[in-house]
Image (spheres, helix red, strand yellow):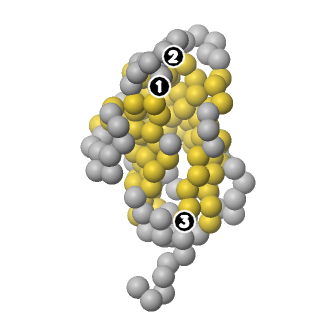
Amino acid sequence: MIHNSESTEGLRNRTTITVVVPAEAGNALGVVVLRQLPNLDQWDWGRMEPLVYLDDYSLRGKGTSGLATALASGSEEDLNIQFNLAIEPGQTVNVVFHGFNPQSSIYQWSTELLADCEDPVRYLGPTLRLNVYEQDPYR
């Protein structure tokens, strides 16, 4: 799942990626890959390292730095989130980014999940979607 506390273009955002690792999963989660689908603008993931917390998503969930690294590709279409400690089956992980919303549009990402093991099988996850709206000139 993807959450964004602010949906107006140009405003500061708090984008959170939430992944629930099923209790019956055979391996722990090691990497999440987001691939932005074609759009006029790229999503701003911010310059700070992501914050991570375990538990259900919370709008004000406090995260800890240093638990994951995020690396954007040169074109910034791909975002690789590597967990320093694997996320065990039955856990829910939230990865929080601080950036700014791009121009108004619908932004979508394909997701890929990789287990924390040698030669992991790539699991194709759901498509994530966020709407960003134009600023209201009458506000």
Amino acid under label 3? Val
User: Which residue is located at x 28 percent, y 50 percent?
Assistant: 60
User: Which residue is located at x 44 percent, y 68 percent?
Assistant: 11
Whether residue 56 sits left or right of residue 31 in the image: it is left
Residue density around tag 2, few if under 14, some if 14–19, many if 20 or more, within 10 Å: few
- In depth, the one of 95 and 73 nearer the eye is 95
**Looking at the picture, how far across and down is residue 67, in whole percent?**
36, 30
* Inter-mark Cα distance, 2 to 3: 34 Å
User: Which residue is located at x 51 percent, y 16 percent?
Assistant: 25
Vertical side of 58 occupied by 104: above or below: below
Q: Secondary structure at mark 1?
A: loop
Quadrant for the C terminus in the image: bottom left
**Looking at the picture, how far across and down is residue 83, in whole percent?**
44, 27
Residue density around tag 3, few if under 14, some if 14–19, many if 20 or more, within 10 Å: some
Q: Is residue 79 visible from the viewing direction of this image?
A: yes
Q: Is residue 47 visible from the viewing direction of this image?
A: no
Vertical side of 67 occupied by 11: above or below: below
Whether residue 39 sits left or right of residue 49 in the image: it is right
Q: Are marks 1 and 2 in contact (CB under 8 Å)?
A: yes
Q: Name the front one of labels 2 and 3.
A: 2
Residue pushed farthest bottom?
Answer: 138
> Which residue was labeled with disc 3?
132
> Which residue was labeled with disc 1?
21
Vertical side of 112 occupied by 116: above or below: above
Amino acid under label 1? Val
Q: Name the front one of labels 3 and 1.
A: 1
**Looking at the picture, how far across and down is residue 36, in whole percent?**
65, 48
Q: Secondary structure at mark 2?
A: loop
Q: Quadrant of residue 32?
A: top right
> Which residue was labeled with disc 2?
25
Q: Secondary structure at mark 3?
A: strand
**Looking at the picture, how far across and down is residue 3, in whole percent?**
45, 51
